[in-house]
Structure formats: C-alpha cells, structure tokens
Amino acid sequence: MENRSEIFDVIVVGAGIMGSSTAYQTAKRGKKTLLLEQFDFLHHRGSSHGESRTIRVTYPEEYYPKMVLESEKLWEEAEAEVGYKVYFKTSQFDLGPSDNKSLQATISSCQKNRIPVRVLDHNQVYEELSGKFQLTEDWIGVVTEHGGVIKPTKAVSLFQTLAIKNGASLRDNMEVVDIKKDDSEDAILVCTRNDQRFWGKICIVTVGAWMKRLVEKVTGLTLPIQPLETAVHYWKIKEGHEAQFMIDSGFPTFASYGEPYIYGTPSLEFPGLLKIAVHGGHPCEPDERTWAASPSALTALKEWIQSKFGDLIDSSGPVVRQSCMYSMTPDEDFVIDFLDGEFGKDVLVAGGFSGHGFKMGPVVGRILADLAIEKQAKYVDLKHFSIKRFEGNSKGNAKDFDDQVNSVG
Ligand SMILES: Cc1cc2nc3c(=O)[nH]c(=O)nc-3n(C[C@H](O)[C@H](O)[C@H](O)COP(=O)(O)OP(=O)(O)OC[C@H]3O[C@@H](n4cnc5c(N)ncnc54)[C@H](O)[C@@H]3O)c2cc1C
C-alpha cells in the first residue's frame, strides 16, 4: 500500500476514543486523514471499550468543567450527525466526608464555573434519594444536573463511522513502531511493524497506555505516563429494588470521595446490576497484564456497598468484571502538546487521561484538530496539559487537595 506520492494531511495513531474523535474532526474539516490502530478496531485491550463511562462536571480543578460542558454539546452534535444515541443523561451525585478537601474544592469549582450545585446533609440525602444512599452525619451529598452515562465502545464506533463518512481512511492491525521526519518529502514518515510506511504533514499520537513506550522510542523523551491495570465491577441489586436504581427512574451517576475514591453508574447496560468500582489500579506493562481483580479493591468495595446501600445491593461479590487500563500522570492531568524538538509543530501527543478522559473525547478531538490545523487551541488554555510542566518538577501541576486515584488498588 506504500504510495510515496500520497501524503496525508493528518495521520492519527491509535484508535481509542481520542484518536477516533480526532480523525472525525480533521476529516470533517476537509483534511485528508488516516487513522492507524495496532489491534482490531473496537478491541478490548486499551481504555475505551465497555458498556459505560460517567460524564460529570464535578471536578476539584476549575479548568475541567468548561471542557465538559463543551464536550456535552459535541456529544449531542455527533449523535445528531450519526442518528443514534451514546449519551444517556441523569444527575451526578458526589458524596464524602464534609471536610474532604477534594469535595470542598469540587463545590467551589462548580460555583466559580456558575454550575448550579446543591449541597445536602445526610438527612436531606436520605429524603432526596428515597433512602437509597445511607450517609452518616459527618458526610454530605452534592447534586449537579450535568451527569450521565456514555457507552464507550458504541461511542468509539460512532466517531469511526463519522470519520469514514467524512472521508477519512481507517486501517487496523497496523502497529506504529517509528515516527520520523522525512526531509526529502517535507513530511512525517510513520512506519508500522508489518513494514508499511505512510507520510503525513502532521502526526497526532493518541496511543493511551502505550504512550510512554512509543514516545521514548521515537524521541528518547520519557513522558511520566504510567499504565495502571484496573477493573469495573457489577453488583446485583436485591430482588424487588431493581427499578429504583435504573437511569430511567432518575438514579444518578455517583462518586464517593475519600480513600479509596469509589464511583458508579445507574442500572442501564445490564438490567438488575449496578456498576460500582474503585478509581485506581496497579502499575502494569500494557502488553503483559494480569487481568486479575485486586483483592484490596474488592474488600474496599464490599465494605463501601454495605455501608452506603445496606440491604439493597448484594455486597457479597461482583457478578460481572471487566478489565481496563488507565494512563496516569503524577498530577492526574492530561498531556496535550506538540512534541517539539526535531518535530517542531508537526507531531502532537495526547495522553495521560488518568482515568477520567472519556467524557472529554469530543472536545479533545476538537482541540487536537485546532492544534494540527491552526497551531493553536480555541477557547481552552492548555497550560495545565503541557509537557513542560514536568521539567524539573516530577509532580506536575500543584494541587492543594488529595489525590483521587488510588495507584495501588
Ligand atoms: C475502568 C475504567 C473506567 C473509566 N471510567 C471513566 C469514566 O467514568 N469517565 C471518563 O470520563 N473516563 C473514564 N475512564 C477513562 C477513559 O476511558 C480513558 O481516559 C480513555 O478511554 C482514554 O482513551 P485513549 O484514546 O487515550 O486510549 P485508548 O482507548 O487506550 O486508545 C489508544 C489506542 O491506541 C492504540 N495503540 C497503542 N499503541 C499503538 C501503536 N504503536 N500503533 C497503533 N496503535 C496503537 C491502542 O491499541 C488503543 O486502541 C475510565 C477508564 C477505565 C479503564
């Protein structure tokens, strides 16, 4: 398929949610786009597969809510363009000890972003959620209306479909092993393990948990992006209570602050089951995973479910488990930047989505297309996502609240 006269405007490497939404965005703007994926499309070995991801605006960092609001719009626009739904709305319910710094920062971040937020004490929570969440008196609940569930595999497929519809070429089973400057063609040369070569004016690398390895190989630069192996668990709702936990009956997406941070989604994809999981995982090599459940995460989940849902959910053990990977940065902020060095503004990287990137897929795709085509992002300040933030400072962005992700669970 090597064709030296064919130079793509944009080559996107990695077809998870970030690469797929980026390919859609660049193709839609008339750019000749190629999307390359190392495995089969819609595989389950990365981070973007499965049945549900939470979308919420509640972030302790003040710079994320605006991005989520923009992403909400873009999710809806993409749904309208393709003609089916991937995004199911409900409210978001955050809970935790009233003195938890992250939860307090989340409340003030909503207020600063003018997002209506209601703070409830434990009695109000009991009333508002009809006794489903049982909090002790030192805990509070925080309700916002911008919550919901996105179906990940279906959403990746949506963006791949729209990318093709807008003229992009998509190739799977193409593992990229090198990216280099080809001065003779004034282009970036992208080489695959099966000896294919592709030329592009711009290359955008969105390879998830493989980012550190590929960038190190291509430039020698070590990005602090650590793959973590994690899992989601589904728990059985006790007989007779199933309807109360369904998204259609208004049950929210939720997150419980503290150690460990636990999150969940309403009953939707598997009737009678609720997804409840620990936000965290153990360090791994992306191609050498254990696929095993973490015993400490399971113990924490059982205790949490028993204390918060009492007899409504069977806390003896999960009935479904799905394995997945996070790409963690030390500050849990994304990396979205030009690689610079010999590549200047011709190679972009977007990774380190740290277990909370899915909801941002459409807005990240738009940002990357802006950077690729216009060399700057509109309406968003990318300083928190720069590679430079780690220079001489391995921790990255300073935060005055606790880490949310448990990196051993
Ligand atoms: C269990 C779990 C729960 C989560 N929950 C939420 C949530 O509720 N809300 C939320 O917003 N986010 C959530 N996330 C995070 C979100 O899913 C990720 O941030 C997002 O999917 C990352 O997408 P990505 O495109 O960067 O990576 P990936 O989906 O991994 O895509 C990268 C792609 O690049 C390919 N690739 C790698 N190397 C190469 C190469 N050399 N050549 C070609 N292709 C290559 C890979 O095969 C892969 O397909 C969760 C993640 C997990 C694991």
Image (tube, grey):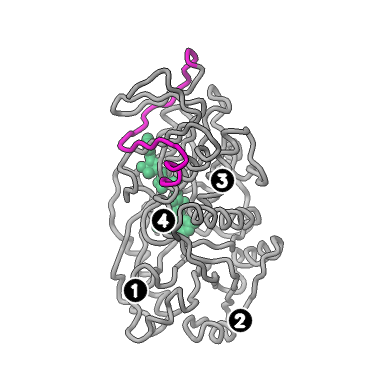
- Dot 3, how many residues are within 10 Å of its Cα: few (below 14), some (14-19), or many (20+)? some
Magenta region: 160-185
Give the amino acid at mark 4.
Pro
Which residue is the site of mark 1? Answer: 271
Q: Quadrant of the N terminus?
A: top left
123, 92: nearer the viewer: 92
Amino acid carrying label 3: it is: Lys
Q: Is residue 23 visible?
A: yes
Q: Secondary structure at mark 3?
A: loop
Tell me the distance, in whole angstroms, between the alpha carbons under discs 2 and 3.
Answer: 35 Å
Amino acid, disc 2: Asp
- What distance separates the C-alpha of mark 1 from that of mark 4? 18 Å
Indicate whether 32 appears above or below 299: above
- Residue underneath mark 2: 121
Q: Out of 349 and 375, give the one closest to the viewer.
A: 375
Foreground pick, 297 / 25: 25
Q: Nearer the viewer, mark 1 or mark 2?
A: 1
Viewer-closest of 66 and 405? 66
Q: Is mark 2 within 8 Å of ligand 1?
A: no
- The residue where tag 4 is placed is 152
Asked if the residues shown at circle 1 and circle 2 are in contact, with their CB atoms under 8 angstroms apart, the answer is no
Residue 34, quarter of picture: top left
> Which residue does the numbered mark 3 point to in the structure image?
395
> How far apart in space, not on screen, are marks 4 and 3 (Cα)?
30 Å
Residue 253: percent from the left, percent from the top? 49, 69
Q: Secondary structure at mark 2?
A: loop
Asked if the residue at label 4 sits under 8 Å from ligand 1, the reply is yes
What residue lies at 37% left-to-right and 61% top-to-bottom?
A: 51
Q: Position of residue 183 (x, y in %)?
A: 49, 15
